[in-house]
Amino acid sequence: MNYLQQRRSALGQTLKANGLDAFLVTAAPNVTYLSSFTGDCSFYAALPKNNVIIGDARFEEQIKEECSDLDIVIRPHNKTTIEAAAETLTKSGAKAVGVEGNRITLGELEALKQFAPKITFVPVDGVVEKQRAIKDPGEVEKIRESVRVAERGFRMFVATLREADSEKDMVDALEGYVRRAGARSTSFPPIVAVGERGALPHAQPTARQLGEGSKLLVDWGADLLYKSDITRTLKSPFGTSPSRRNKMERVGYDFEKLYAVVLAAQNAAMAVIRHGVKAKDVDAAARKVIANAKFDKYPELRLGDFFTHGVGHGIGLEIHEAPRIRANSEDVLEAGMVVTIEPGIYIPGWGGIRIEDDVLITHDGCKILTTLSREPVTLNVG
């Protein structure tokens, strides 16, 4: 089945429904989705009679290899891609042209108007992103492979950890192992947080060493064009030194009990997922478990106050894309979407626990694409 042609046909139907003659795609992930071109600095134009990719000489051979079914416009070095796009649109005879209102910059839009004054440009938000939210079987398999590569890299990573490794050392190592496992890069700069620094959901790497904390939060993924996104929180065998000033991390809360709450929240969210369910209902299912958790030993601990983000998001050509699974989301889940489910708790001074897996939404539930254990694991550090 020609999925590329299906994507282009769907875009064409949307254009007609909006009274548009053509559509200019400027966001690189959307250009890739409609053309198969894996480079950058190029635009895609759906025109009245044909489809065109507009690039420059640096990518000419690559465009010919990857986009043989498209008409190609290679701009000269003394013209910008915006100028070349304006000329191409003008020559096509289009009068009303849609642009990606949520992607194109104000400067780019003004330049288009300057170089193509006879065309009316109409900002339209999220047209291609809406199509991208539902993955075809080929895309699902690419995400599966991205997950497999991320997991292979992670297994190599944990096998080589040492007590003196800093967060920066561990980030560098993880990026290398994911590439060695087959990725072109990680999906994003990995998050590796030791001890109480896990309370920062997007902690930046520091000189903090693995042996200085009682737990390790790792958030990473593999980029094989399509991306994966996984988080595991591991117990450290080192504990913390009694001389540490941070009493919360030294004494702290029971790791296993708090981990069990987060895992129960993730399972509750996954139990709700299926075609037709509102994304905010999935978020609510996880949030309810965390908010209702109570511990006699810790009467002051209101876990609901420490779950500070949505429970998940779509993944694909971008690491964050539709649907958005959060309390205020109006998205409705559909079969074929691939999303993360990642509840977490973040207690300042103690640390954080997050468990994140990638799942495929089906008509009657979901399939977990990740295979790493979701049970609590203690690092075996040499």
Image (spheres, rainbow, N blue to C red):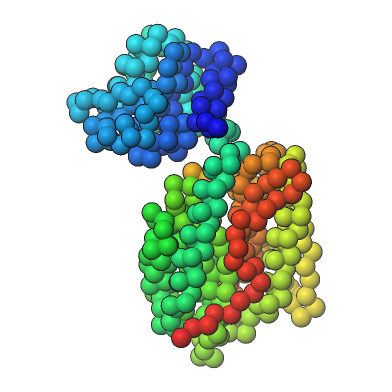
Question: Is 21 placed left or right of 339 in the picture?
Answer: left
Residue furthest out toward the front: 1
Question: Is 94 placed left or right of 311 in the picture?
Answer: left
Specify the quadrant of the image occupied by residue 180: bottom left
Q: Position of residue 96 (x, y in %)?
A: 47, 12
Quick check: can you spot residue 360? Answer: yes
Residue 120, placed above or below residue 377: above
Name the residue nearer the viewer: 344 or 180.
180
Name the residue nearer the viewer: 142 or 302.
142
The quarter of the picture where the N terminus appears is top right
**Residue at 53% from the left image edge and 82% from the top image edge:** 380
**Residue at 49% from the left image edge and 83% from the top image edge:** 381
Q: Position of residue 44 (x, y in %)?
A: 40, 27
Specify the quadrant of the image occupied by residue 204: bottom left
Name the residue nearer the viewer: 80 or 58.
58
**Residue at 58% from the left image edge and 33% from the top image edge:** 130
Residue furthest out toward the bottom: 242
